[in-house]
Image (tube, helix red, strand yellow):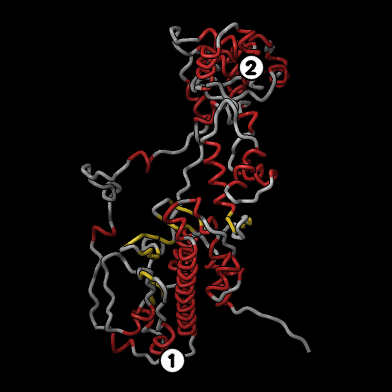
């Protein structure tokens, strides 16, 4: 004898749909529509016959706004109507045709909007990300040079990384060529200088010093402090990196105000010129939940455009015969059952997502009103206990799900954070501490930046007990440099 826990296919499907992001779910729905003839999508502007209980039960709607309670569906009750063959009596003999000739046979231009459409953006639909190498090769094709020089140039471009720097040494590149070509090191150096004149400025540099000098050489001759900036980048870049301003003023024989203007000119350059060319396509986030304030109340609703509404096709469902055990009827019966499970799993996903999002908004009203500094501590157990679900379910719901708020779009996991004790016996979330830390650094004196110990002392003065190591961890997570690297000239 033994005990074991098994999961039904319906439960496995519900769990799998629950953890999918909106874009993945849309792809899953499209695959289900293509493989199951019993499923159909409700198009915009189409009205289902609400007098028909089956159509009402099998339709999945995600447009309802929910604040505290959820309506129970009638999918199971209406599913019995199919097995009794009641669809034969409800389907009219002549169904209306909603497809026109132009809908099927369209020209490629018919799907494009008119020229007076203000929302049409041609570049966003036709532009393709360009790699740095293809951008440089395009400029190379416009430059007149011999076949040997062009071969060298193509090899050099292949050795340029995404930041715009030449990764290989010229000696290694020279050894890679066929000895019969008799390519000298000086020839490679000359071709490299030609590539370094390409756009973006500073491309093909071998180190940061050369990258900055290449960009400074392309500035107008009358640029203020240009010669001094070239001297600093060429001879004293290590002192600038160590922020040894007193030594810089002595070596360059300039005053503090003059050195500040020279440094500002250098800081206006791009240390990674290749990053200007973005090859990857932009990734768009589709919010699953929309939160808005109405009459001093925060309302939570599902994104109507995120997931299409589905129902069982009444025409095909009417072909199912209850007592028929033929292969065709068995196939249609199985497809009908799978369609019911899929619709019910989608509805369960939407209901669970609404429950979790509603509880998050209830806990984090302070954030919605006042921002990050008012974020309260929240863990998965708190939401799981409030909605009566397991923590693993809450984790699946909050992964790759996004909430659109008046303050921006956030992943649901963003609202969860650990807590730090306060001197008054309360709790403060780590997100709020990060916001306070960022605010303190933004208001610090650039000549005397705050150290981690000083920030910990300021937080303790506000009643927040944080160790110096914790402050350093939060500072690094925000991408803020240490105090020694934040020191600047006024």
Extreme-left residue of the structure:
116
Kindly identify which residue carries mark 2.
237
Measured as percent of width and height from the top left, residue 359 is found at 48, 68
Foreground residue among 134 and 356: 356
Decide: is 451 above or below 272: below
N-terminal label among 1 and 2: 2
Measured as percent of width and height from the top left, residue 277 is found at 50, 31
Decide: is 32 above or below 456: below
Mark seen at residue 322: 1
Q: In this view, does 124 lie to the left or right of 282?
A: left
Q: How far apart are marks 1 and 2 (CA)?
A: 84 Å
Measured as percent of width and height from the top left, residue 87 is found at 33, 86
Q: In this view, does 85 lie to the left or right of 257?
A: left
Judged from the image, the secondary structure of the residue bearing numbered disc 1 is: loop
Q: Label 2: few (<14), some or many (≥20) within 10 Å? A: some
Quarter holding residue 49: bottom left
Q: Label 1: few (<14), some or many (≥20) within 10 Å? A: few
């Amino acid at each position: 004898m033994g005990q074991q826990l098994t999961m039904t296919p319906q439960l496995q499907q519900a769990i799998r749909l629950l953890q999918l992001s909106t874009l993945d779910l849309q792809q899953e729905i499209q695959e289900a529509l293509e493989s199951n003839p019993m499923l159909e999508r409700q198009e915009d502007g189409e009205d289902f016959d609400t007098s028909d209980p089956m159509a009402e039960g099998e339709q999945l709607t995600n447009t309802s706004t929910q604040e505290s309670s959820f309506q129970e569906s009638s999918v199971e009750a209406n599913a019995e109507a199919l097995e009794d063959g009641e669809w034969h009596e409800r389907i009219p003999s002549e169904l209306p045709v909603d497809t026109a000739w132009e809908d099927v046979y369209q020209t490629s231009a018919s799907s494009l909007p008119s020229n007076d459409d203000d929302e049409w953006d041609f570049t966003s639909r036709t532009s393709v990300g360009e790699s740095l190498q293809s951008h440089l090769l395009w400029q190379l094709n416009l430059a007149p040079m011999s076949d040997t020089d062009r071969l060298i140039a193509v090899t050099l471009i292949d050795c340029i990384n995404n930041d715009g720097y030449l990764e290989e040494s010229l000696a290694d590149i020279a050894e890679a060529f066929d000895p019969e070509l008799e390519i000298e090191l000086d020839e490679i150096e000359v071709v490299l200088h030609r590539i370094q004149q390409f756009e973006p400025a500073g491309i093909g540099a071998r180190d940061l010093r050369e990258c900055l000098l290449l960009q400074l050489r392309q500035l107008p001759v009358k640029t203020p402090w240009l010669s001094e900036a070239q001297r600093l980048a060429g001879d004293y870049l290590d002192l600038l990196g160590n922020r040894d301003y007193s030594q810089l003023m002595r070596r360059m024989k300039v005053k503090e105000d003059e050195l500040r203007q020279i440094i500002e000119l250098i800081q206006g350059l791009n240390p990674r010129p290749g990053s200007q060319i973005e090859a990857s396509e932009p990734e768009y986030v589709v919010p699953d939940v929309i939160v808005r304030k109405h009459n001093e109340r925060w309302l939570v609703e599902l994104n109507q455009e995120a997931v299409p509404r589905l129902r069982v096709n009444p025409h095909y469902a009417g072909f199912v015969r209850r007592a028929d055990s033929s292969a065709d009827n068995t196939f249609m019966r199985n497809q009908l059952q799978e369609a019911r499970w899929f619709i019910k799993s989608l509805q369960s996903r939407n209901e669970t997502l609404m429950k979790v999002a509603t509880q998050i908004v209830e806990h984090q009203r302070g954030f919605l009103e006042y921002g990050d500094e008012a974020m309260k501590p929240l863990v998965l157990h708190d939401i799981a206990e409030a909605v009566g679900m397991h923590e693993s379910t809450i984790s699946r719901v909050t992964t790759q799900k996004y909430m659109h708020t008046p303050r921006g779009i956030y992943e649901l996991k963003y609202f969860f954070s650990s807590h730090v004790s306060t001197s008054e016996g309360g709790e403060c979330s780590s997100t709020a501490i990060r916001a306070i830390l960022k605010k303190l650094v933004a208001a610090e004196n650039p000549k005397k930046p705050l150290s981690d110990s000083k920030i910990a002392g300021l937080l303790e003065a506000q009643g927040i007990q944080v160790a110096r190591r914790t402050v350093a961890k939060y500072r690094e997570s925000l991408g803020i440099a240490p105090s020694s690297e934040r020191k600047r000239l006024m």
